[in-house]
Image: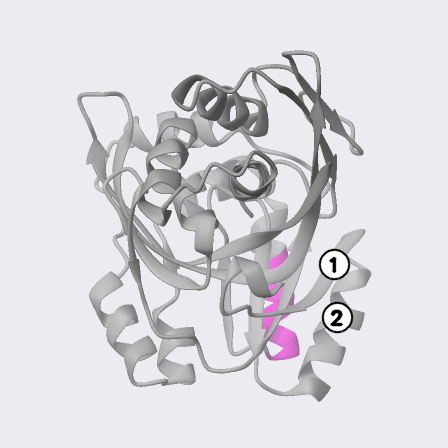
Amino acid sequence: MRVLEKAPAKINLSLDVLGRREDGYHEVRMVMATIDLADRVECESLAEDEIIIRASAPYVPEDDRNFAYQAAKLIKEKYSIRAGVRVSIDKRIPVAAGLAGGSSDAAATIRALNRLWKIGMTYESMLDIAGKVGSDVAFCIKGGTALATGRGEKISPLPPLPPCWIILVKPDVSVSTAQIYREWDDQPAPALHPDVDAMIAAIARGDFLAICRLLGNTLEAVTMNKVAEIARIKAHMNRIGAEGILMSGSGPTVFGLTQRESKMQRLLNGMKGYCPQVYAVRLCRSAELV
């Protein structure tokens, strides 16, 4: 038996790091939104009691470093599943890009195994598994638009964003999330903190221009020091006329927002000369609707 799930990417509209916790994670407040660029995750039941990961893209680990592997292992242990599974990941989301591709693959694996093995997990049970795998996995279980707090595992749904286009531009370089957070810790002066509460209020009233104005990511300056191309991408997007521009997550992907299809086409065409990986995508109300 096989079960297929889509694993959509996310963008961060607001990402604030409040400090390092005693458990080694960081306390965060993040507003995230699901977009319709998605991996495909297929889970196939195996008679042998093993977990096999297969990914279509290079540099994706196919062992216990993979979040999907970790999610499957936790489910097998918690529910005493003796069967095995082959998880096949068809990668469409750029790797190590700040778009939660690996986290979304893990969330899709949790949803798929719930169906494949007929476990009957509640949303809260899925969140429990997700929180043990990685900080963004909990958000990716349902997706949509939400505030994530704690180390990212506490999810509070928000109203959907106004309809718009998102242009994603990924420089031809990858960054380590763990390294970016370590460098954030080492900053000599307090980082700039985005106004997360104002962003939540702007989303609640559907104010697209205010959402664009309030975009903020406290990790952006850290990653920009390592990847100079981010600043050039942002400047070029601004010249073309994107209403809002920000780096997503720990980067290095930059996104631009616009509500006008004509401007989306100009951004898409204008940015293709800068980077090989450029996408025009839309928002999703939930991970299930991709």
Quadrant placement of the C terminus: bottom right
Residue 177 in the image, given as x and y percentages of width and height: 47, 32
Q: Amino acid at mark 1?
A: Val
Which residue in the structure is indicated by mark 2?
268
Q: Name the element at disc 1.
A: strand
Going 62% across and 56% down the picture, which residue do you hit?
232
Name the residue nearer the viewer: 274 or 176: 176
Percent x, y for residue 52? 70, 19
- Nearer the observer, 138 or 272: 138
The quarter of the rendered structure image containing the N terminus is top right
Q: Secondary structure at mark 2?
A: helix
Circles 2 and 1: CB atoms closer than 8 Å: yes
Badge 1 is on which residue?
A: 278
Bounds of the magenta segment: 233-241
Q: Is residue 237 left or right of residue 182?
A: right
Q: Is residue 245 above or below residue 180?
A: below
